[in-house]
Image (cartoon, rainbow, N blue to C red):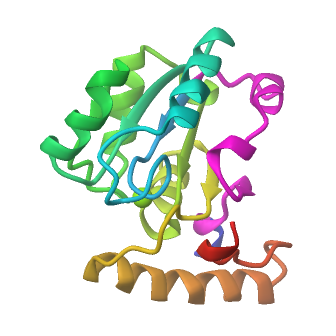
Amino acid sequence: MLKRFIPKQYVPTVFDISIQGLKDAGIHYIITDLDNTLVAWDQANATEELEAWFTHLRKEGFTIAIVSNNNEKRVKAFAEPLNIPFIYRAKKPLTGGFNQALKLLNGRKEEAVVIGDQLMTDILGANRGGYNTVLVVPVKPSDSVFTKFNRIMERRVFSAMKRKGLIEWDQIDSRKR
Ligand SMILES: [Mg+2]
């Protein structure tokens, strides 16, 4: 059961993901969460650094889609100016949103990676769907009640995985990214 929560990689921020590493793994499609993965949950638009990252990824041959549990208004306002296709109200950890995104990109699952900041939604869902996964540390602690509950569960899952020797890393605190 715990194995479903193990991300393939765990990094402080999306900028720490090795682009060469993705290429070497045959990855061409990036399916990413929005809130607290790309920007803080309460930040409307991409930062300059993030825009530059997307530009670089595209130059390197990657295509990108956003899969978010948030509503249409939020996800559309963020993704449209960047020309990134998106799925909103994805109901992660259900796997449908990831599969829809892959279809939008016309991609193959083996060539896709899912990036997210939550074990209970992003990583659990992506693993269930058979995707490669990268967990990032949340950009900013969230205030939503639902996310707070998920975070409590997440801390338990993290320490259980560590205790059982399933992962080697400790959970990184948002403030220490
Ligand atoms: Mg998130």
Is residue 153 a member of the stretch shown in magenta? no
Q: Nearer the viewer, residue 95 or 53?
A: 53
Q: Quadrant of the C terminus?
A: bottom right
Drawn side of residue 30 relative to residue 77, left or right? right
Q: Is residue 135 above or below residue 21?
A: below
Q: Name which quarter of the figure residue 166 lies in.
A: bottom right
Residue furthest front as drawn: 48
Q: Position of residue 78 (x, y in %)?
A: 29, 36
Q: Quadrant of the N terminus?
A: bottom right
Write down which quadrant ligand 1 falls in. bottom left
Q: Position of residue 14 (x, y in %)?
A: 63, 45
Residue at 34% x, 19% y is 104
Q: Position of residue 175 (x, y in %)?
A: 62, 75
Q: Is residue 2 above or below residue 49?
A: below
Q: Which residues are magenta?
A: 4-29
Is residue 6 a member of the stretch shown in magenta? yes
Residue at 48% x, 41% y is 32
Residue at 27% x, 54% y is 69
Residue at 27% x, 24% y is 80
